[in-house]
Amino acid sequence: MPDNRLHADGARVLADLHALRGIGTYKTGVHKPTFSEPHMRSLEWLAERLPEAGLTAAIDGIGNVLGTTTKSGPKLLAGSHLESQNFAGWLDGPLGVVYALEAARVINPDPNANGAVEVAAWCDEEGHFGSFLGSRSYVGGVTDADIDAARDRNGDRTMRDALREVGLAGRARAKAERGRHIGYLEAHIEQGETLESGGLSIGVVTSIVGIWQYRISFSGEQNHAGTTRMDVRKDAGLALARFCVAIDDRFPALSGPRTVWTTGRISLDPGAPSIIPGRAEMLFQIRDDDPRVIERLEDLLRSMAAAISAQGRCSVAVERIRTGAPAMMDATFQQTIEAASSVLAGGRSVRMPSGAGHDAQVLATIMPAGMLFVPSIGGISHHWNENTADADIVTGAQVFVETCRRLLMQ
Ligand SMILES: [Zn+2]
């Protein structure tokens, strides 16, 4: 039987990824903060390649690159991002952009293919200026006032200044046209070890977890560290430390299989060794894709706090400061990625949630969305040692292109 399937060109995909790695190289990775010179050169690199896929390229007023077509038929949007974390890896972002470019190059000119793939590189996914500003702008979630308020976390410049410096000030921001796309597909490195340790090639993302964040405050009594006997102290710092340990002891009984929790910044007030801290505060984060699990854990957190307060030494207040919204990936997209994996990756795929945030969670608010992961060597990411085996990159590209083709046929 003749093979009429359209194939990704693995060598071309690898060459493109290495070309992007050559812009803003840092050690074995890259350093491309949003609106830096290497970031802008990467956007231009993409804009120059999009016509190879029959796409018209434009960079909009927030730094999104969009490749669009006038071809009739269904259209699938695909992409990721091109800026990096500081001094980070070469695949986080570019992998998904190059896969999207490759899918467009293979599918768009083919007279037998149905519809077309349109390509996006979303600006500032890595959050140098905000949170998913590029993709959120596209779905209509960013106001001009939001941009006025945005500042570079690496320095002092405002987003307005940065946009002016790179020549994007005054340009219109591209907005999603309702109904234009059948959905959004994004590929990404896993940034974890599930695929590698399982000998798997493809992660079929089921959901992108929501992030819930808390400020937990402890109030005791500030006093002299030399003259206050241990048995009468009301040490807010000690109460905080015990609370951290208690969380780790008690959360597992009520958490889900992939729930994660992390204590971030801890501060003691005053933070001096000769003073018993009267106040202490910790920032605490929980991630899961099931709000019911979070509700259980939040109830537990509050009951633990109440129990400590009831003992009378220190009072504990739990304040939720961020409420996560998990994004569910579309069921048809998941099935299609799985079916493409069974043909092109020997079925070595697994369904899994994403513990990290991605632009797909933003696109999922207005259209069906799906994601696939390729293995990360050693699970390393946000570090210049981030890497994926060439064979896995090529397999991922093949599964990605086949998934696009099948989605457009449906
Ligand atoms: Zn990324």
Image: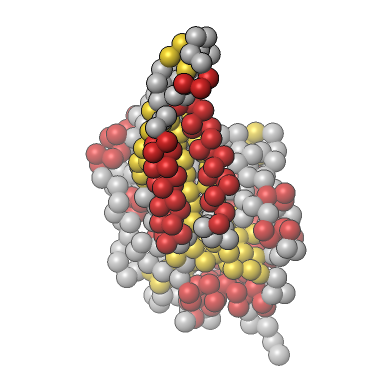
Asked if residue 6 can be seen in this view, the reply is no
Q: Quadrant of the N terminus?
A: bottom right
Horizontal relation, residue 159 to residue 5: left or right: left
The quadrant holding residue 223 is top left
Colour scheme in the image? secondary structure
The quadrant holding residue 146 is top left
* Towards the viewer: 226 or 132: 226
Asked if residue 407 can be seen in this view, the reply is yes
* Towards the viewer: 52 or 39: 39
Q: Is residue 335 above or below residue 311?
A: below
Q: Is residue 366 above or below residue 192?
A: below
Q: How many marks?
A: 0
Location of residue 358 in the rendering, given as x and y in whole percent from the top left corner: 48, 53
Q: In percent of the image, x 48 and y 76: which residue is there?
A: 332
Q: In percent of the image, x 53 and y 72: which residue is there?
A: 334
Q: Is residue 167 above or below residue 372?
A: above
Horizontal relation, residue 372 to residue 214: left or right: right
The quadrant holding residue 32 is top right
Q: In percent of the image, x 48 and y 13: which residue is there?
A: 228
Location of residue 354 in the rendering, given as x and y in whole percent from the top left corner: 54, 57
Q: Is residue 297 above or below residue 336?
A: above
Location of residue 316 in the rendering, given as x and y in whole percent from the top left corner: 39, 36
Location of residue 48 in the rendering, given as x and y in whole percent from the top left corner: 51, 50
Q: In percent of the image, x 63 and y 42: which residue is there?
A: 89
